[in-house]
Amino acid sequence: MRKTLSFIKLDFITIKPYLTLKNLIIFAVIMLCILITSGTIAAIVGLVAFLCVTYVSYPFAVGEQRGIDALYITLAIPRKTVVRGRYLFAIATDLSAIALSFVVTLLMSIVSQKPFAVTETALVALIAFFMLSLTQTLQLPIYFKLGYTKAKVLAYAPFVLWTLIPLLFTGVISPDIGVTILNWLKANTYLSIGLCLAAWCAAFLASYTLSTRFYKAREF
């Protein structure tokens, strides 16, 4: 476990040069413009989620450019430790990004003098976390199998998938069935949350298993 925590710290050091005050100011200005023009908190959370996905991919890019993966082998770091650390780093980054989006949304609402709905913001942030995490369960195995250069375009395919899913559901499921499903989810809140958590855990376990298998098979 100590090696895994050290690896997470190493990944953070990798992205630290990109977390400059200049970049944070630029992001803050963009978020303020989005809030003023759109008037919705979901847009800010979505932007933070997209930036989070970008930052999680940086360790793969730096590792490939500088041959760090070969160095892990030289230092006798087990490949499963690399995979485990990268997944925990992704989860930690997701949680930090969602928490940051919550704080930024509060500050932006004060600056723009717009009302701040705590429940709505928390719900949007929670949904964003699950969507962001599930996106990464699709992306990380691609990075571990192909490397950053070959996978950087393909890894953004999940975003296209998220836009197609509503279209597929509206084409397959009738409005009456859709309303029935939503009413059932509202009537069984805790069961719905439990099912979502179970699906999230299953997706992460399957993704982690694939990534470990792919990374062990790669040659450096």
Image: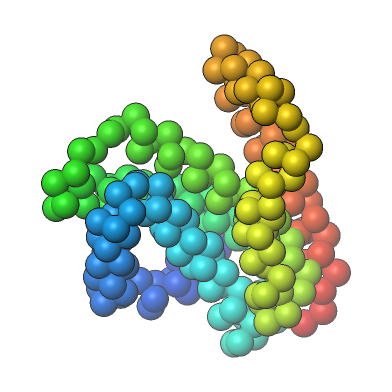
x and y, in percent, of residue 130 in the image: 56, 42
Residue 62 or residue 168, whichever sits in front:
168
Residue sitting at 45 percent across and 72 percent down?
A: 15
State whether residue 156 is above or below residue 202.
below
Instruction: Count the labels in the image.
Output: 0
- Residue 5 left/right relative to 142: left
Residue 38 position (above or below residue 197): below
Residue 151 falls left or right of residue 13: right
**Going 14% across and 53% down the picture, which residue do you hit?**
111
* Residue 168, position as x, y percentages in the image: 74, 45
Q: Is the C terminus in the top left, top right, bottom left or bottom right quadrant?
A: bottom right
Location of residue 146 (image quadrant)? bottom right
Query: Image height check: is 134 above or below 153?
Result: above
Residue 160 image point, x, y percent: 66, 60
Q: How is the image coloured?
A: rainbow
Tell me if I can see residue 83 in this picture.
Answer: no
Q: Residue furthest top?
A: 187
Q: Nearer the viewer, residue 162 or 198?
A: 162
Task: Please state if 147 lies on the left or on the right of 52 as rendered.
Answer: right
Does residue 63 appear in this view? yes
Q: Is residue 127 above or below residue 50?
A: above
Q: Residue furthest bottom?
A: 66
**Residue 207 appears at what percent x and percent y?**
74, 51
Is residue 22 rendered to the left or right of residue 162? Answer: left
Outermost residue on the right side: it is 217
* Residue ID at (78%, 51%): 209
Image quadrant assignment for residue 139: bottom right
